[in-house]
Amino acid sequence: MNKYCFLIGITLFQCIYAQTTPKYWSVRGNAGTSPDTHFLGTTDSQNLLFKTNNLEAIQLNLDGKIGLGVSNFSCTNCSGFRLFVKGFLKAEKIKLDIASENGWADYVFKSDYQLPGLEEVEQHIQKKGHLPNIPSAEEVVNNGIELGEMKAKLLAKIEELTLYTIELNKRNQNLTRQSSDLDHQINNQNEIIDKLQKRIENLELNHRKTF
């Protein structure tokens, strides 16, 4: 009897101890954990690796940078980057935070913006092979692009095209009005010519009757 009571007591103690003091992470979930003492990670100066089929899939380095298919986090001008991905990235929605209003392209519509002339743009294209304030293909290959910055630059070009179109529309309207005025003048002159022609014909007719 005492033996059975002892075994039952040991079993209950183990169950209670296992529930209140987890020693390992269960693949079925965990309870009673504390972020100070229970976590997935390393306690020494080593990167954390996640593997599938014994091949590295994800790496978390000492600076908190995450690599998907990337083990080398060194690159130019990217010290503040946290996520590195090798390969394609598919997302349903991506939101970019712009640091300030000056980072967007609405400045193109301000009254003090110096819109370059089309001749100036043409000369830049002929000389350098790309639009002003847009990186060349070589620069993009060597340095990549910052998505938010590039979208702002492309928007600036769209807004410049809008201003060019508005200006061309104004010129077209002026030409249309001038053309209409010329047509009116020509019609008036034709009417005057017709009247003069009739007067000449009448004069000739009267002259013949006289003689």
Image (cartoon, helix red, strand yellow):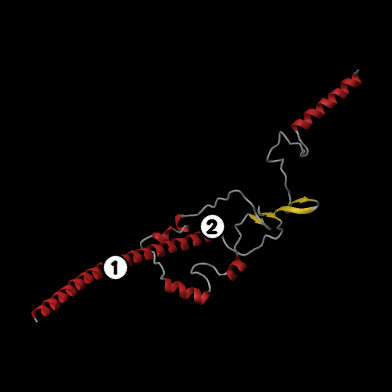
Which residue lies under the disc numbered 1? 178
Q: Which is more foreground, mark 1 or mark 2?
A: 1
Mark 2 and mark 1 in contact (Cβ < 8 Å)? no
In the rendering, which numbered label is found on residue 41?
none
- Residue displayed at 39% across by 64% down: 113
Residue 11, horizontal then vertical, whole percent: 84, 26
State the separation of the CA atoms marked 1 and 2: 45 Å
The residue lying toward the viewer, choosing from 92 and 51, is: 92
Q: Mark 2: which amino acid?
A: Gly
The residue sitting at the top extreme is 1
Image quadrant occupied by the N terminus: top right
The residue sitting at the bottom extreme is 211
Q: Mark 1: which amino acid?
A: Gln
Question: With 203 as the anchor, is 23 left or right in this view?
Answer: right
- Residue displayed at 43% across by 73% down: 120
Compared with 199, 161 (above or below) is above
In the rendering, which numbered label is found on residue 148?
2
Helix, strand or loop at mark 2: helix
Image quadrant occupied by the C terminus: bottom left
- Residue displayed at 80% across by 28% down: 15
Residue 161, horizontal then vertical, whole percent: 44, 63
Residue 208, horizontal then vertical, whole percent: 12, 80
The residue lying toward the viewer, choosing from 174 and 118, is: 174
Helix, strand or loop at mark 1: helix
Q: Residue 75 appears in which quarter of the rendering?
A: bottom right
Residue 77, horizontal then vertical, whole percent: 59, 63
Question: With 49 as the anchor, is 102 left or right in this view?
Answer: left
- Residue displayed at 71% across by 33% down: 32
